[in-house]
Amino acid sequence: MGRYDGDAFEAAYDKVTAKWPADREALRVPTPFGTTYVNACGPADAPPLVLLPGGGGATSASWYAQAAPLARTRRVLAVDLLGAPGRSEPAADRHPRTVADFTAWLDALLDGLGVTRADFGGHSYGAWIALHHALRAPERMRRLFLLDPTQCFAGFKAAYLLHALPMLLRPTPGRVRAFLEWETGGAGALDPDWLRLQEAAAGFPAIRPVTGPRPAPDALRALNMPVLLLVAANSRTHDTYDVTRRAGGLLPLAETDVVPGVSHHALPQSAPGELARRLSEFLGDGRE
């Protein structure tokens, strides 16, 4: 494993969160699984929107391009996953090990935030967590958007796993950059501060991530909740059109679309105006 530089990570994290709206607050919420760090912005009395980042080096800070437009109508609550790069602190004797644990953790997080019911959004691995939570605790979720979700409707491409393998076996900043340059088609289109944060996360003392099967088709067919699925046209993670076809055939209240000219890892930061418009239209004003 590469040598982790905590000071460099913290500095890179601060550089990205500086792109958030000026009213950003840092919240630390105790749960039975550890203290969860949340970047929050928007009116305190607005309908809550919980955002979950992808895996790997992604953190809640990665939502910076969407935070301001979404905060016009929402109380944005972007979460650092427990045991992953970020500022959340997992408990020494208990951290999420199963999908059921994720549901218990998110329920405790909502309780700690004083939230009964919220909209949810997730990218990549965060979308997988959010979708499982929707299936297990639908009473706590109003609407759900999924950005290029992984392991929800289709598996990974073999080429993606092969390119990711060196980074997974021995994470270093150089290997992280090389992988992201390959998946996104070149680092020129990536925010340099965001890229630096991904590099700084290499070697972060993370806990083994929770993985598991895709959601059961019968459970997806029974999900009585509006879902917006936006898949990256240039994603090298999975077959874009296979994902949209399968999701459209399983989710009864799903709206699916392909976002042109963007890759999997760049999706939350790319085309911020167009993406924010789509998300805001889907979320509506928050009234029941």
Image (tube, grey):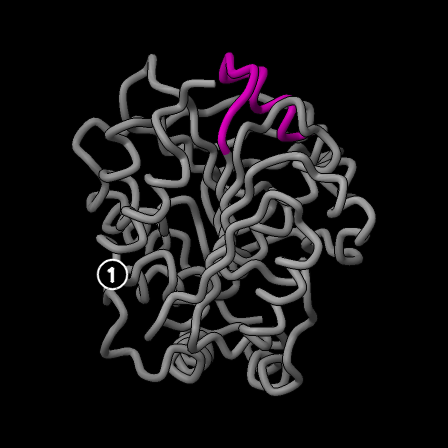
Which residue occupies the foreground of this view, 93 or 154? 154
62 and 198: which is toward the camera: 62
Q: Amino acid at mark 1?
A: Asp
* Residue appearing at x 68%, y 68% in the figure: 154
Q: From which residue to which does the magenta span run?
A: 105-119
Residue at (62%, 67%) from the top-left corner? 245
Which residue is pictured at 78% across the width and 37% down the height?
Answer: 100
**Residue 83: image location, x then y, percent:** 60, 46
Q: Which residue is mark 1?
A: 193
**Closest to the observer: 189 or 206?**
189
Image coordinates of residue 182 in percent, x first then y, are 42, 84
Q: Is residue 219 magenta?
A: no
125 sits left or right of 64 in the view: right
At label 1, counting other C-alpha atoms closer than 10 Å, the crowd grade (few under 14, some 14-19, many 20 or more) is some
- On screen, 240 above or below 93? below
Q: Quadrant of residue 212?
A: bottom right
19 left or right of 211 in image: left
Main SS of the magenta part reads helix
Residue 64, percent across and down? 29, 47
Looking at the image, residue 222 lies above or below residue 196: above
Q: Is residue 116 inside the magenta stretch?
A: yes
On-image quarter of the N terminus: bottom right
- Would residue 185 be found to the left or right of residue 212 on screen? left
